[in-house]
Image: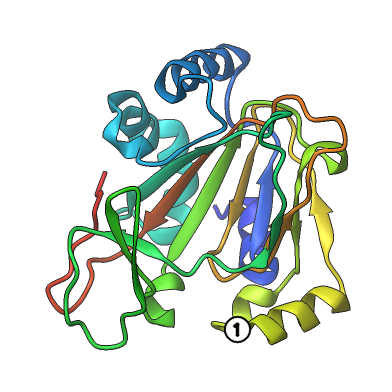
Amino acid sequence: MRPTWLFDLESNGFAVIPQVLSASQVEKLRLEVEVASGGEHALRGLLDFEWVRELAQSETIRSIMEPVLGKECFAVRGIFFDKIPRANWLVPPHQDLSIAVMEKGEASGFGPWSRKEGVVHVQPPRTVLENMATIRLHLDDCDETNGALRVVAGSHLKGKLSNDDINQATRSGEKFVPVPEGGGMLFRPLLIHASSPSAAPSHRRVVHLEFAASELPGGLNWRWKV
């Protein structure tokens, strides 16, 4: 039986699952990210940590990602975000166009290349991004007041967009996506999304996990595969 939220993901490019994590799981993850991040507002390379790999492979997360990407899907990147008074940043409207790979290669249609905190990143062809999905696990209530994502519903169906096209689509209409503590937000990488600074910055902790459904062409390899 298809999950009811799957239709929202397919048609709108995003879906909210109000309860993914129990209160005890939320508290455990809060403690884990506090130690791993040293209290900082962001941390890349989460899949280097065993507790994150276990989370990505857990029955809870697999039961969500497999209906989207199939039973052979795997996690390819993990990031922690928070919004606190000293790091209350603005994220302008954008699409998630880069993936993390082991090393630079010559695969057709891949580029430009970049490096973030020592990890090679590249923008792949649209077909790769269309076979990916992200789940954001919220460790705090998140709404319009503390940086909930703003999205343009259905924009994931338009492929890679220029900055002008993104700005035009955003002007045509965007909406806030509140997510409760313990809830999850699923979205496709090509969905236009943004985040405003928090009006009353406190914690807005999110564990962001990206999943893919297939290997990369041209001899390229995912940096992480969990």
Name the outermost residue toward the left: 219
Percent position of residue 72, x then y: 28, 55
Left or right? Give the position of 63 relative to 219.
right
Which residue is depicted at the point 58% across and 69% down?
Answer: 95
Residue 77 shown left or right of residue 43 in the figure: left
Q: Which residue is mark 1?
A: 161
Q: Position of residue 145 (x, y in %)?
A: 87, 38
- Asked which secondary structure carries label 1, the reply is loop
Packing grade of label 1 (10 A; few <14, some 14-19, many >=20) is some
Quarter where residue 148 is shown:
top right
The C terminus lies in quadrant: top left
* Residue at (86, 30) in percent of width and height: 200
Expressed as whole percent of the image width and height from the top left, the position of residue 161 reads: 60, 83
Q: Horizontal placement of 37 versus 122: left or right? A: right
The image shows residue 10, relative to residue 100, as above or below, that is below
For residue 212, what is the image quadrant? Answer: bottom left
Q: Residue at x 68, y 30 (%)?
A: 86
Which residue corresponds to the image point at 61% horizontal and 74% vertical from the top-left?
A: 156
- The answer to which of 202 and 18 lies nearer the viewer is 202
Amino acid found under the numbered disc labelled 1: Leu
Number of on-image labels: 1
